[in-house]
Amino acid sequence: MFVPVKGRRLSEEIAGQIREAVMTGQLQAGDRLPPERELARIFGTSPLVVRDALHTLESDGLLQIRLGALGGAVVQEASHRSVTRSLATLLRRTKATMDQLTEARLCLEPEIARLAASRATIEDLAALERALDERRAAVRAGAHPRLHDIQFHRLIAEAARNPVHLVVVHALMDLEAEAVVPALSLTAEDNRQVLRAHQGILAAIRAGNAGEARRLMEQHVLDVQQRLESLENGRPDSRRS
């Protein structure tokens, strides 16, 4: 599977060979790589160079490096998390504004809601209902409910069954949790409107009404955008979704 490496970027070459083995299925999720010293012998280099390559692949989300007697480098299940972290970091570094964030959501989330209405499973619907229940409980307890709202949108993206959408939505929601949640102050009427909007979207998804799910999500995100604009301008606006 692997061949000795040559050149000036040995760790990159090692990482590339292991990555290719994962991508082509020669290495499967759960497979354990040989110990570092054995890999160093196979690649014709030092354990330190191998360790550097393994840590790079761990950062990419392809491997998990476990410690202890049963430790070592293990191939990870495919996951959106590493890509989401990278995208969220990029968005933070570009200093995307709240207005730009909701503009991006407006381009994506109505279509995602439409797909969810066609693809959601019984388990998806139950998870969405639980998210609404948890939001109600948070409001009753006097806690900030926005993180529950964000979780509701993540779950809709999962129900849409498109991994590309899921990665982007998770990144946008991570950014919103960091940038938007601290700025929001919801009134009792705001909270009622949020819940009504989410209940309507869930009802459309449960009924398999793709067009209505799309329309309600578009209206929902537009209301979010209006609320954020009013916050940035210092003019409280009771409309909220």
Image (cartoon, helix red, strand yellow):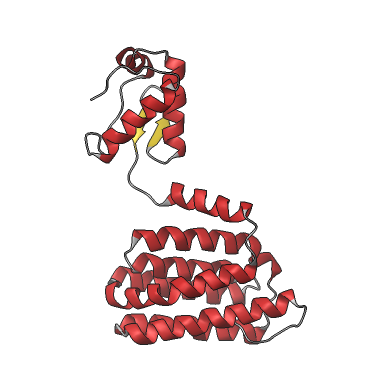
Q: Which of these two is toward me, 131 or 97?
A: 97
Counting the numbered discs, the total is 0
Q: Position of residue 127 (x, y in %)?
A: 39, 69
Q: Residue furthest right?
A: 234
Q: Position of residue 191 (x, y in %)?
A: 60, 81
Q: Which of these two is toward me, 93 or 176?
A: 93
Q: Position of residue 30 (x, y in %)?
A: 29, 37
Instruction: Residue 199: tell me if it is visible.
Output: no
Instruction: Residue 163: tell me if it is visible.
Output: yes
Q: Position of residue 208 (x, y in %)?
A: 29, 82
Residue depicted at x 45% and y 46%: 82
Residue depicted at x 72% and y 76%: 231
Q: Quadrant of residue 119?
A: bottom left
Q: Quadrant of residue 147?
A: bottom right
Q: With 35 as the anchor, is 87 left or right in this view?
A: right
Question: Which quadrant: the C terminus?
Answer: bottom right
* Above or below, 221 relative to 80: below
